[in-house]
Image (cartoon, rainbow, N blue to C red):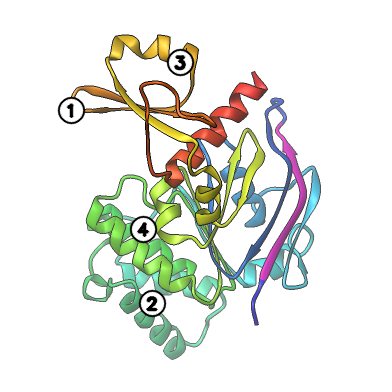
Amino acid sequence: MSLELRIEGLSKTYPNGVQALRNVSLNIPTGMFGLHGPNGAGKSTLMRTIATLQTADSGSIRLDGIDVLEQKDEVRKILGYLPQEFGVYPRISAETLLDHFATLKGIHQRGERKDIVTALLRRTNLYDFRKQSLGTYSGGMRQRFGIAQALLGNPKLIIVDEPTAGLDPEERVRFHNLLAEIGENVIVILSTHIVDDVSDLCSRMAIISQGQVLVDGVPAQSIAQLEGRIWRRTVAKDDLEALKSEHTVISTRLVAGQTVVHVYSASQPPGFEPVSTTLADVYFSTVQMAEQKAA
């Protein structure tokens, strides 16, 4: 039976006046769902609200018949959460700390707990390092330990907030493979500002900026809708400002000392060449146009 997380009209304004969420509505099915947006977009506020760690001003969230905003204890029974800042006790071994977390999760039979801890350490490729103190773990190993604790109790909903920031390429690939495996049978919400994390992993996604949902759908379809509207040109750095005054520049990057510019246009601008659209182009064009509209 497939699950669906339904978010309707969710809004949140902090006491300092910052409106973190503005009437957010999303339907999130079983599988990997990417929540993408710049820093300060409202992603972490949305994740923390779904995870029952803070309240909303208005709106609703429902999961498998559970009112997430009202039935917090019921949600926590089926929730796994890996926050952006996941602290560990550096002098305690992974096996000991995971056993402690399992006890807190309500797994009180020692034999059952040992079997579950062993299985999770094997699944996250940490079993051979189970006796090591967590302070000796690399960033990727700590993130995999974070997923192990999030999987305690066979959750139906797993929330992972900015999991690959700071990981080296090899650890990032290993972590991606683990997330993809987990996402086959449960809802996994991956909140990230890294475009490749979404394009590599997620069958559905949303782009959020300034607390609003700008795009909600299948990554491949969002790319297809933009095909033929993204153009590329290499320019000198000193010419960039003039180019910005003439075109809708969505991204720039330095390549071998030259500035490669991508612009959005319904027709080919003079001096530009066509380029195959990527999810990065979807993201940058969506956020850029929203910011221009708000200005």
Q: Earlier in the sequence, mark 3 or mark 1?
A: 3
Cα separation between marks 2 and 1: 45 Å
Which image quarter is the C terminus in? top right
- For badge 1, the amino acid type reads Ala
Q: Is label 1 in contact with label 4 (beta carbons under 8 Å)?
A: no
Q: Is residue 174 magenta?
A: no
Of badges 2 and 3, nearer the viewer stands: 3
Of badges 1 and 4, nearer the viewer stands: 1
**Residue 284 seen in render:** yes
Q: Position of residue 218 (x, y in %)?
A: 56, 57
Q: Earlier in the sequence, mark 3 or mark 4?
A: 4
Q: Nearer the viewer, residue 65 or 247?
A: 247
Which residue position is annotated with label 1? 256
Which numbered disc covers residue 120?
2
The residue at 56%/36% (across/down) is 286
- For badge 2, the amino acid type reads Leu
Q: Nearer the viewer, residue 270 or 153?
A: 270
Mark 4 crowdedness (10 Å alpha carbons): few <14, some 14-19, many ≥20: many
Cα separation between marks 2 and 3: 51 Å
Q: Which picture quadrant has residue 88? A: bottom left
Which numbered disc covers residue 130?
none
Which numbered disc covers residue 143?
4
Mark 3 crowdedness (10 Å alpha carbons): few <14, some 14-19, many ≥20: few
**Direction bottom: furthest residue:** 111
Q: Secondary structure at mark 4?
A: helix
Cα separation between marks 2 and 4: 13 Å
Which numbered disc covers residue 244?
3
Q: Which residues are magenta?
A: 4-14
Q: Is label 3 in contact with label 1 (beta carbons under 8 Å)?
A: no
